Image: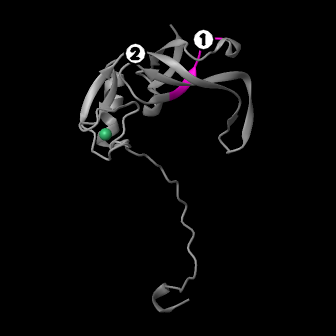
Amino acid sequence: MEPGGLKNVDTVEIPAVPVFSWSVGNFMEKFFDGLKDGKLMGIKCPKCGRVYLPPRMICERCFTENEEWVELPLEGTVESFTIAHVKVGDDGELEDLETPETIGMVKHKGADTCIVARIEGLDPADAGVGMRVTVVIDKSAENILDVLSHYVPC
Ligand SMILES: [Zn+2]
């Protein structure tokens, strides 16, 4: 014990419970705000006219900053899909799914890119390229990334 009741220490254990939160940023916030209003918003390159869904800040073709928000139809077309039989669990390990899930790349009329999401309400064996689907929006989702919940066949 040092004078004054103090002692030298090498290590101090401090219990810590980190709480993380992150922002999607001002740019993506417009996309998610649109979803909460029931709108699917893409963004258009002012130079080459390419429309991005999901939105991207910079055009991948001409490196121009995208700035013109455009409302796109809620219905889209399956351009490609896969059937998932496993998922990544909370511990990072692969877990078998009880029922396989259909994951599709969906292109909306007026967009030049596809958005990737689950397609529900169908037997995965019935999934196909060219299938028409509509987006399902969950305005009450706790996680903002889940507001665009999934797609269902039209
Ligand atoms: Zn461009």
The residue drawn where x is 50% and y is 13% is: 133
The quarter of the picture where residue 103 lies is top right
Residue 86, position as x, y percentages in the image: 72, 32
The residue pinned by badge 2 equals: 74
Asked if the stretch drawn in magenta spans residue 31, the answer is no
* Amino acid type indicated by mark 2: Leu
* Amino acid type indicated by mark 1: Gly
The residue drawn where x is 38% and y is 41% is: 24
Asked if residue 143 shows in the view, the reply is: no
Give the answer, above or below, for where 153 lies relative to 88.
above
Q: CA distance from mark 2 to mark 1?
A: 17 Å
The quarter of the picture where residue 80 lies is top right
The residue drawn where x is 53% and y is 19% is: 78
Q: Quadrant of ligand 1?
A: top left
Q: Residue reaching furthest top?
A: 154
Residue 128, position as x, y percentages in the image: 62, 15
Q: Residue reaching furthest bottom?
A: 3
Part of the protein shown in magenta: 116-122
Residue 75, position as x, y percentages in the image: 43, 14
The residue pinned by badge 1 equals: 121
Give the answer, above or below, for where 98 lies relative to 4.
above
**Secondary element type, mark 1:** loop
111 vs 66, left or right, is right
Residue 27, position as x, y percentages in the image: 30, 40
Query: Of the residues under marks 2 and 1, which one precedes in the sequence?
Result: 2
**Secondary element type, mark 2:** loop
Give the answer, above or below, for where 112 lies relative to 128.
below
Q: Nearer the viewer, mark 2 or mark 1?
A: 2
